[in-house]
Image (tube, grey):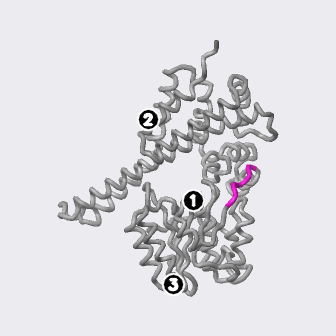
Amino acid sequence: MTAVAAGGRVGDVWADLVGQQRAVDVLRPATAGKGMSHAWLFTGPPGSGRSNVALAFAAALQCERRGVEAGCGQCHECRTALAGSHADIGLVRTAKLSIGVDEVRDLVRRSALAPAGRRWQIIIVEDADRLTEQAANALLKAIEEPTDRTVWMLCAPTVEDVLPTIRSRCRQLTLATPTAAAVAEFLVRSDGVSPALAAYAARASQGHIGRARALARDEATRNRRREIVSLPLRLTSLGACMQAATNLAEVAKEEAEAITGELDDREKVDLATTYGVVERGRRPREYAPALSALDKSQKTRAKRRVLDVVDRGLMDLTSVYRDAIAVAARAPGSLVNEEIRGDIEELARTSSPELNLRRIGWIFEAREQMLEFNVPVALALEAMMVALKVPERS
């Protein structure tokens, strides 16, 4: 289990929960005991802020103030909760493809302990949808037989991603996808982003706050997205399709390595220090299996990171075909990719809404092959790009 910093927000803990006023209206009374439960399930699409909502709620439950003032963001309890250093709040996220039974047993043991403070022992599981079957069964027993001062908070994309026996014992709260206007206002207010850039990032992220922040802050991220959304009109030959697949796979691998490389090196140095390899200049017998286990864990984490980057690219690609359908149907409102409206209109003119809907289906099929059936990324992307190829004009 690892405690993960949440950015150390200042002020009311509810203030940065973008577009989640309905959730706040449910959680505020719960901090005062109205509708409180020992187990909660927060669901919502990626980027809706499931773990942020859970952490804000946890901070409010530990807050030194009570009632409507709980979650002040100023007291010691709130500040340590938001900083990820509160002794009675464990925020669990996995960098691997799944959460195993051994990890969950550690959580269950912690949940049985009395809190160090006067309030609650709170366990937040950010990726409850990644629990293995054994892990889920171990968690179920703890939720079925809770201690008086333990609160479980599970986060998942949908209720269907969690075992029915677990979700039936949780109070469920579904989060909304924030509107583009709400995300843009948040970026301007919290990050000092210009209104024009904030509007672009909010539209392009499709309500994903973390993605919106990355697009607003980093030009390289914006350039990578521009490359992806320009693909549909460039898939004019088999060679172009194969090259596009190769480029996307390589970019994903490079980005993943840039994110995980430094962490991998630091973990290996820490392991060597723990076993005295650096200090003594020799390797004890236990070091080799520990290093092997670490290598395996790092490879799994790198694989997930690659899949995450590719998945993000596929969602950007999907948005182009979605926009083309909207243009063809003369739907009101702004496009996700308003900045390339000319390309979108050309795509709508040269293809039918039915074809673009099928293209979206092919993208989701490739996504399922990689995420669910472990098909190699390069192979799935090649098949997808060929399917997306622009038909030759007669």
Q: Nearer the viewer, residue 146 or 307?
A: 146
Q: Residue furthest top?
A: 394
Residue 174: quadrant of the picture: bottom right
Q: Residues within 10 Å of mark 2 (few under 14, many from 20)?
A: some
Q: Amino acid at mark 2?
A: Ala
Disc 3 secondary structure class: loop
Q: Residues within 10 Å of mark 1 (few under 14, many from 20)?
A: few
Which residue lies under the disc numbered 3? 147
Above or below for 179 versus 366: below
Q: Which numbered disc, 1 or 3, marks the residue that appears first in the sequence?
A: 3
114 sits left or right of 73 in the view: left
Tell me the magenta residue range. Answer: 175-180
Which residue lies under the disc numbered 2? 378
Label disc, if present, on residue 94 of the rendered structure: none
Residue 60: quadrant of the picture: bottom right
Which residue lies under the disc numbered 1? 160
**Looking at the image, which residue is at 49% across and 34% down?**
381
Alpha carbons under labels 1 and 3: distance apart: 26 Å
The secondary structure making up most of the magenta span is loop
At which x and y percent is residue 214? 60, 48
Disc 2 secondary structure class: helix
Quadrant holding the C terminus: top right
